[in-house]
Image (cartoon, coloured by chain):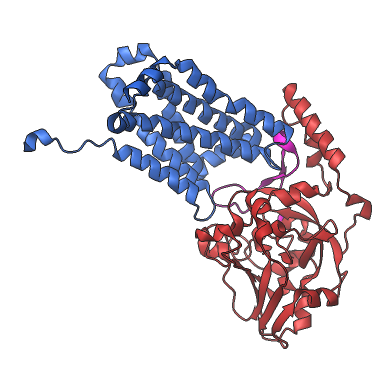
Chain colours: A red, B blue
């Protein structure tokens, strides 16, 4: 069931734009000199401007609290994580529960490129050219049983390799969950690479979830376990602060985080004078996913 | 320790002002040239806020250092306090101009977000302190000056709570700041006068 969703972007759009970015930085600097704050990144604010962030931004600005809470901590410390060998336990309400080796999964899956917006709950965003396969294909490989309603995910927990877990920033291991229809949606992928290269450790190697219409923390990294269940699974941020982080966590500019507005966001890569741009409902994927939530009060089910 | 104090007396306060002022333009330069990472606005905002908090801590350390170590750095306290105020003002300016940008949202944030409210209150409380950090005010206000400047204790605690509250999850660093600040304040509580017992 690969290729169920297509971008209207061409391959040429997914090119690292180092030179372009450098020039942008220079313009931003020049604008600062002239006292024209805000001019440098104005081009960013335009609609349909889905230009991927460059490799350095995507791989140096990460939230992966198992390696520390600083944005640069994952890039600095995640190389300690051993990602070979890697197995994913798929269990619960499936026909073929097993420990699936990463290589075996890759051999059966169709890897495609997905250029997605990525919106963090902290009100910043990127555009990332992921490589990966549809989660539906993996779940179908294990055989989803008819009673299953939810999918639970778990991140690897290795205190020897993850210095950040010594302190209980969150209740480790990191866990996440989706409703089954969200998990089976063609937009939902298991990403295994970026820009055609293997997934860097700091971005969740060797495989991670990407659900582009939800806040980034739903897209759980370095997955070791997937459990099909009939009950809504616990999710890490919801456990840590249920008032601030709901199970759904769909990108929604009209529902604020209690501590900050979600109406706007700042795209990473715009430099010191990057403007805020309006956040789109479902992160711009409203046409594809809004029907999943028909009749639901999204203010209550935030 | 006396030799130390003699040495300290030779250091002009201007040196402290200059030393404390250097990081601000340097950080701004780094932000413009990409040296603060992929998201320089938040990085700059955070760095300026943290330096402000560190200067507040340094200012609070002066009395205990004199009392328990015998090290007299009193002549630098005004510089530390004024520079802390300057960094809070810069931190606020970055938040207003570069971070939030939208006027309606700035006001909404101040009112609706408790951690912003607390930060704002701490800043406002610092204004009378900065305004009276001069010899004229000390002379003019006399005893009242000492009373007024005890607001620093409130400002320090509010600053640490602001840091704890804005952090996601249960983080160690802001808790360390609060512990150090509370510790420094506790050192100010004089033990019960022994004279009465004797």
Residue B78 at what x, y percent from top left? Answer: 41, 21
Q: Residue at x 40, y 15 (%)?
A: B134
In this rendered view, identify the residue nearer to me: A10 or B84. B84
Q: Is residue A201 left or right of residue A27?
A: left
Residue at x 67%, y 68% (from the top left corner): A295
Q: Is residue A216 visible?
A: no
Magenta region includes residue A269: yes
Residue A55 appears at what percent x and percent y? Answer: 79, 49
Residue furthest to the bottom in view is A95
Give whichever of A167, A297 is nearer the camera: A167
Indicate left or right for B149 with B120 as reference: left
- The residue shown at (70%, 84%) is A98
Q: Position of residue B176 (x, y in %)?
A: 44, 46
Residue A244 appears at what percent x and percent y?
54, 57
The answer to whether residue A257 is above or below residue B47 is: below
Q: Which residues are magenta?
A: A255-281
Relative placement, left or right, of B25 versus B197 is right
């Amino acid at each position: 069931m690969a290729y169920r969703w297509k971008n209207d972007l061409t391959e040429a759009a997914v090119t690292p734009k180092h030179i372009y970015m450098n020039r942008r930085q220079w313009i931003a600097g020049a604008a600062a000199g002239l006292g024209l704050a805000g001019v440098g990144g104005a081009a960013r604010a335009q609609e349909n401007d889905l230009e991927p962030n460059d490799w350095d931004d995507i791989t140096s600005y990460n939230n992966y609290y198992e390696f520390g809470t600083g944005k640069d901590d994952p890039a600095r410390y995640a190389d300690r994580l051993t990602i070979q060998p890697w197995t994913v336990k798929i269990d619960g309400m499936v026909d073929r529960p097993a420990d699936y080796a990463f290589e075996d999964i890759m051999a059966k899956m169709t890897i495609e490129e997905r250029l997605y917006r990525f919106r963090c709950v902290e009100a910043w965003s990127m555009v990332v050219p992921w490589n990966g396969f549809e989660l539906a294909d993996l779940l179908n490989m294990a055989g989803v049983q008819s009673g299953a309603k939810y999918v639970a995910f778990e991140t690897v927990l290795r205190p020897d390799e993850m210095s950040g877990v010594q302190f209980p920033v969150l209740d480790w291991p990191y866990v996440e969950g989706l409703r089954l229809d969200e998990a089976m949606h063609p937009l939902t992928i298991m990403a295994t690479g970026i820009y055609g290269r293997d997934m860097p450790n700091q971005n969740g190697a060797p495989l991670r979830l990407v659900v582009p219409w939800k806040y980034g923390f739903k897209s759980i990294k370095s997955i070791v376990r997937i459990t099909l269940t009939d009950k809504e699974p616990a999710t890490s941020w919801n456990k840590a602060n249920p008032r601030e982080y709901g199970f759904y966590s769909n990108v929604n500019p009209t529902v604020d985080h209690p501590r900050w507005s979600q109406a706007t966001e700042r795209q990473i890569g715009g430099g010191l004078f990057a403007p805020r741009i309006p956040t789109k409902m479902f992160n711009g994927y409203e046409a594809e996913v809004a029907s999943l939530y028909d009749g639901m009060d999204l203010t209550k089910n935030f | 320790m006396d030799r130390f104090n003699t040495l300290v007396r030779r250091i002009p306060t201007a040196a402290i002002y200059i030393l404390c002022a250097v990081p601000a333009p340097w950080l701004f330069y780094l932000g413009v040239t990409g040296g603060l990472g992929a998201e320089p606005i938040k990085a700059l905002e955070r760095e300026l806020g943290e330096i402000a908090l560190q200067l507040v801590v340094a200012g609070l350390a002066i009395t205990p250092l004199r009392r328990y170590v015998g090290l007299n750095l009193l002549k630098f306290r005004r510089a530390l306090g004024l520079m802390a105020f300057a960094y809070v003002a810069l931190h606020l300016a970055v938040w207003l101009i570069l971070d939030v940008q939208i006027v309606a949202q700035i006001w909404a944030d101040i009112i609706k977000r408790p951690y912003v409210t607390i930060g704002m209150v701490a800043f406002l409380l610092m204004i009378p302190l900065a305004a009276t950090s001069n010899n004229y005010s000390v002379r003019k206000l006399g005893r009242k000056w000492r009373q007024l400047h005890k607001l620093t204790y409130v400002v320090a605690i509010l600053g640490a709570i602001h840091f704890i509250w804005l952090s996601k999850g249960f983080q160690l660093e802001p808790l360390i700041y609060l512990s150090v600040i509370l510790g420094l304040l506790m050192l100010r509580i004089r033990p019960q006068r022994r004279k009465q017992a004797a």
